């Protein structure tokens, strides 16, 4: 009997319909018009400045709803249920034809995307395997080769509805291809645990 074991997999969490329609409408009304910073890689993508989670009633509600998922996801990353804080949030407004270049997030451990509008399938968030890994130099990519978690270089998230949440390790590269649908609005954020303990050597983080 043979068995395939997934060694050192990368976790990603999806939570459907975390936000209700009233909270989504409040967030879009409060922040989408404030996205005044144009992305340097796409003039059809704009961002707000960094938002503190406690700076508005709507953001406080969002942070409270995210908290249980953060604790659960963090337990998969670090093997312990830690206390997590959201460092910063920001709203992204992606117009038709715009895209988000491949990037990751520094100075955090968990990042997330909350969809405030439905995302057209063309503009699904795509996660990319790091090109600096220890894989084979040669690959086997052609129409007859089946992609799996063990050989794929990219993972495209399923269609996202307004209110859906995705959590992922902050180091994970991700991008958004050209948006062929209507305006796409998301709320992104970074989070840190209160501390990490490596055999008695404890590093504490403050927010």
Image (tube, rainbow, N blue to C red):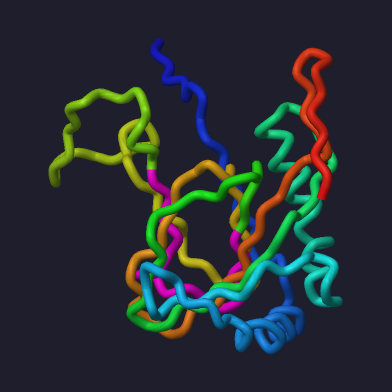
Q: What residue span does the magenta drawing correspond to?
A: 113-128
Classify residue 14 as left or right of residue 148.
right
119 relative to 80 in the view: left or right: left
Which residue is at 52% across, 67% downward? Answer: 160
162 or 102, which is in the foreground?
102
Q: Can residue 84 be seen in the rendering of this structure?
A: yes
Q: Which quadrant holds residue 169?
A: top right
Residue 147 % position (x, y):
29, 40
Q: Is residue 71 above or below residue 97?
A: above
Which image quarter: residue 1? Answer: top left
Above/below status of 28 relative to 133: below
Residue that appears at 52% across and 35% down: 10
* Residue at the top extreme, as displayed: 1
Please tell me which residue is depicted at 47% across the width and 77% down the height of the picture.
38
- What is the total number of numbered labels drawn onto the structure image? 0
User: Where is residue 26 shown, x and y percent of the image?
Assistant: 74, 85
Where is residue 170? Give x, y as percent: 58, 45
In this rendered view, identify the residue nearer to me: 61 or 99.
99
Residue 122 drawn in magenta? yes
Position of residue 154 relative to residue 59, above or below, is above
| Left or right, 74 with reference to 55 | left
| Residue 38 drawn in magenta | no
State the residue at coordinates (83%, 15%): 200
Measured as percent of width and height from the top left, residue 174 is found at 44, 52
Residue 162 visible somewhere in the drawing: no
């Amino acid at each position: 009997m043979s068995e395939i074991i997934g060694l050192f997999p990368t976790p990603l969490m999806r939570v459907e319909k975390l936000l209700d329609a009233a909270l989504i409408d409040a967030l879009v009304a409060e922040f989408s018009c404030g996205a005044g910073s144009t992305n340097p890689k796409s003039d059809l993508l704009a961002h707000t400045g960094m938002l503190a989670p406690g700076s508005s009633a709507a953001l406080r509600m969002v942070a409270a709803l995210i908290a249980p998922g953060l604790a659960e996801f963090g337990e998969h990353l670090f093997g312990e249920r830690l206390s997590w804080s959201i460092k910063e949030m920001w709203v992204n407004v992606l117009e038709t034809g715009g895209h988000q270049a491949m990037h990751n997030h520094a100075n955090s451990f968990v990042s997330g995307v909350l969809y405030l509008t439905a995302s057209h399938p063309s503009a699904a968030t795509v996660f990319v395997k790091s090109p600096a890994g220890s894989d084979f130099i040669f690959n086997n990519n052609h129409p007859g080769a089946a992609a799996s978690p063990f050989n794929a270089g990219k993972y495209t998230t399923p269609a996202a509805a307004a209110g859906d949440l995705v959590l992922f390790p902050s180091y994970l590269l991700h991008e958004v291809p050209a948006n062929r649908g209507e305006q796409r609005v998301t709320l992104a954020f970074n989070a840190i645990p209160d501390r990490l303990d490596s055999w008695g050597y404890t590093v504490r983080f403050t927010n």
